[in-house]
Amino acid sequence: MWMKKTIPIVLLLCLAGSITSFADIVYENDYEGEAVGDGFPAWNWGDNGTVHNAVYAEYDGNIVIEHTGTIGNSTTAARNMRFGSKWDIELSGNTSSDPADYYIAFDIRSVSGNWDPIDLEFYVLTKIGGTADNGYGSGVSQYAQADGWVHVEANLADLTVGWWAGTSWDMTEPMWSIEVGGPPWPGTSIPAGTAEWDQIWLMDNLIITMGEEPPSPATEFATDPVPEDEATDVFREPSLSWTPGEFADTHNVYFGTDFDNVNDADTSSPLLVSPTQDAN
C-alpha cells in the first residue's frame, strides 16, 4: 500500500526531510505498532440488530483497522440498519481556533459485503468542557469494493453536517473524537427474512494537520521500485531504482533480507549501505 513510510521490498527507502515543513501534524496514526487481532478501542454501534466490531488486522503487509458489520433481518418486517465506530484521539499543538486551519486525511476501502458500493460518512468532534462531543460531518461518499484504497481528505471548514448533540467546536481542546460509519441515518432498509452477511471495510493512516493541507501520499513518498514489490527471478546484480518523493532531497538506502530489520533500521544500522544519496 503506497501510503506507508517505506517500500516493502529488499530495497527500502527512508526519505530525508519532513512534511512538517509545510504542515504541522497535530495527530497521526498508521497503527503499525498495534497487535493483529486486538480490539480497536472504540464505541462500536449498530442499529436495529446490526452487530459491529473493529479489530487491528494485517492487510497487504500493513496493520489496519478492520470494521465488520454483521447485517441481516430475521424478523417479519423491514428494518433500517447501519453501523460504525466512534473513538477518542488526543491532539498536540492544535493552537488555532479556526476550523479552516485544519485538515483531516485517511485511507479507506470496502472489502466485501452485499452493499457494493457502501455509503459511509465521517464526523470530526471536539470535547466541550472536556466531555461533550460537538462538531460536524462530511456527508456521504460511496466506496466500491473494486476501487481498492481511496484517500479521503477534507478541510474541517468544509464539513457541513451537524452533529446531533451540538456543533460548538473547540479546536484547541486536546481531546477530539472521530466517527466513521454508515449508511447514514436512518440507514438502509433490509427486507424481512434477509439472511445475515458481513460488510467489511478497512481504515488506515489517520492524520490531522494544522496550517496547511497534508501532502498527497502519491507524491510524498517514493514509488515505482525497480525491481517491483515482491518480484521473483530477479538478476543477482540488478539496477535498483525508484521514483523519488516530491519532497525528498536525499535518500538513505538500507539493504537486508528481513523486512522488520530493514524497516526498523536507523542511520546507525549496518544495513545502511548508502546514506544521503542524491540519485534515485
Image (spheres, rainbow, N blue to C red):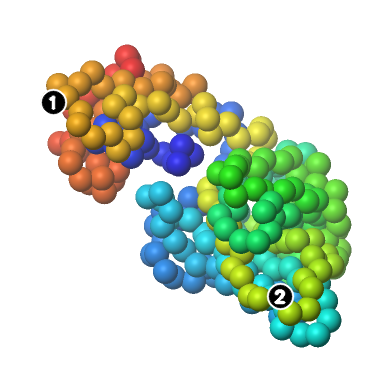
* Mark 1 vs 2, N-terminal side: 2
Report the number of discs. 2
Q: Secondary structure at mark 2?
A: strand
* Within-10-Å neighbours for mark 2: few <14, some 14–19, many 20+: some
- Where residue 228 appears, as percent x and y from the top left, is 33, 30
CB within 8 Å, label 1 to label 2? no
Q: Is residue 91 above or below residue 81?
A: above
Indicate left or right for 207 with 115 as reference: left
Q: Which residue is mark 1?
A: 236
Label 2 amino acid? Thr
Which residue of the protein is positioned furthest toward the bottom in this rendering? 75
Quarter in which the C terminus is drawn: top left
- Horizontal side, residue 190 vs residue 214: left or right: right
Along the line of sight, the residue nearer the viewer: 105 or 218? 218
Relative vertical location of residue 43 with respect to residue 102 in this rendering, above or below: below
How far separated are the C-alphas under marks 1 and 2?
56 Å
Residue 31 image offset from top left, x and y in percent: 46, 55
190 to the left or right of 39: right
Measured along the vertical axis of the image, is residue 126 above or below residue 247? below
Label for residue 194?
2
Residue at the image point whose x is 23% and y is 35% from the top: 232
Q: Secondary structure at mark 1?
A: loop
Which of 166 and 129 lies nearest the eye of the viewer? 166
Q: Position of residue 218 (x, y in %)?
A: 52, 30
